[in-house]
Amino acid sequence: MKNISLGQALARFTAYQNAENQPKYARAVTARIAELIDHCAEVGVTKLNNVELKHIRDWLRKTPKKSHPGAWKARHLAAQTFFNYCVFVSLMNPDDNPLTVSPRGTTLTNKPLLTEFDLHRLLMVVHDNHMGIQDKMACILLWNGYKLSDLNGLTVNDILRFPSPAKELAETTLQFRQHLRNNSLWINTQGNPRIIHEQKLNKRLQHYAERAELNDPSRVSASLLYQSGNYHRLSEVEEEE
């Protein structure tokens, strides 16, 4: 199979996007791939089949720090779309697709991440009252890979599957709610089910971060806890490998 230039591959990809997708999306996805190709050219890679995972990883690391939180994900998805297209139209063999494996580690996000020590400091300043215990559980679950949308669907029946620290906290609350019929994990002080709203939770997290004297507490959010926990778990996998 002929190893065509990245410019030629982009031209075909652009024609396909313009013909098959909405103009706004086509412009955005092709612009991101043009940025990737420029990055590859800077390191001397101009042929499609010569692009490696490390080139994409380094490009993702260049995502501007002040970009919106989804910027890394949007770039990563554009790269996946591009290389999958190249395989689909036989511009490259499936085995040559550099994104059959996703980049990991420090390329997971373009935002400064929290450390495990930051998490412990955050948890230490949260009060052990009704709301505080639920916030601690939420923090630990987010760190361990639960998305905010996942949290709101949890019931007391899910406690057995929780990571140890969250399980211990949850089990201590059960003795105070034996009279309640509602099965929701998250309840208010009246015993009624409650929803964890992202904006309200983030405000509380930022308040805790100030009390814990974390760097730039205004950036601390449910999303950052989730991303930071994912990074640390994936880093451990990389070290084992």
Image (cartoon, rainbow, N blue to C red):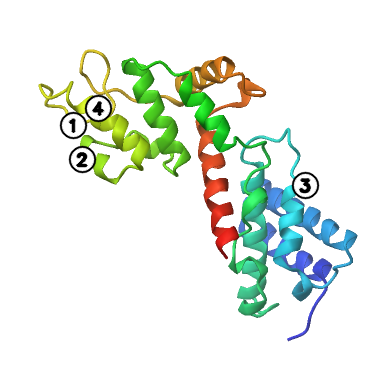
Viewport quadrant of the N terminus: bottom right
Tag of residue 72: none
Viewer-proximal residue, 147 or 233? 233
Which residue lies under the disc numbered 1? 183
Q: In the image, what residue type sits under mark 2?
A: Asn
Task: Name the residue located 47 percent from the left edge and 22 percent from the top edge.
Answer: 124
Tag of residue 62: 3
Instruction: Find out whether the residues at labels 4 and 2 contact each other: C-beta distance under 8 Å.
Output: no
Indicate the position of residue 103 as horizontal and vertical percent values.
63, 58
Indicate the position of residue 232 as horizontal and vertical percent values.
56, 46
Calculate the distance from the C-alpha at mark 1 to the C-alpha at mark 4: 15 Å
Say which of marks 1 and 4 sits in front: 4
Indicate the position of residue 195 as horizontal and vertical percent values.
33, 25
Which residue lies under the disc numbered 4? 172
Relative to 62, is 111 on the left or the right?
left
Compared to 37, does 113 lie above or below? above
**Image quadrant where residue 178 sits:** top left
Calculate the distance from the C-alpha at mark 1 to the C-alpha at mark 3: 46 Å
Q: Secondary structure at mark 3?
A: loop
Which residue lies under the disc numbered 2? 157
Q: Secondary structure at mark 4?
A: helix
> Which badge, 1 or 4, comes first in the chain's sequence?
4
Q: In the image, what residue type sits under mark 3?
A: Lys
Near mark 4 (Cα within 10 A), the count class, few <14, some 14-19 or many ≥20, is few
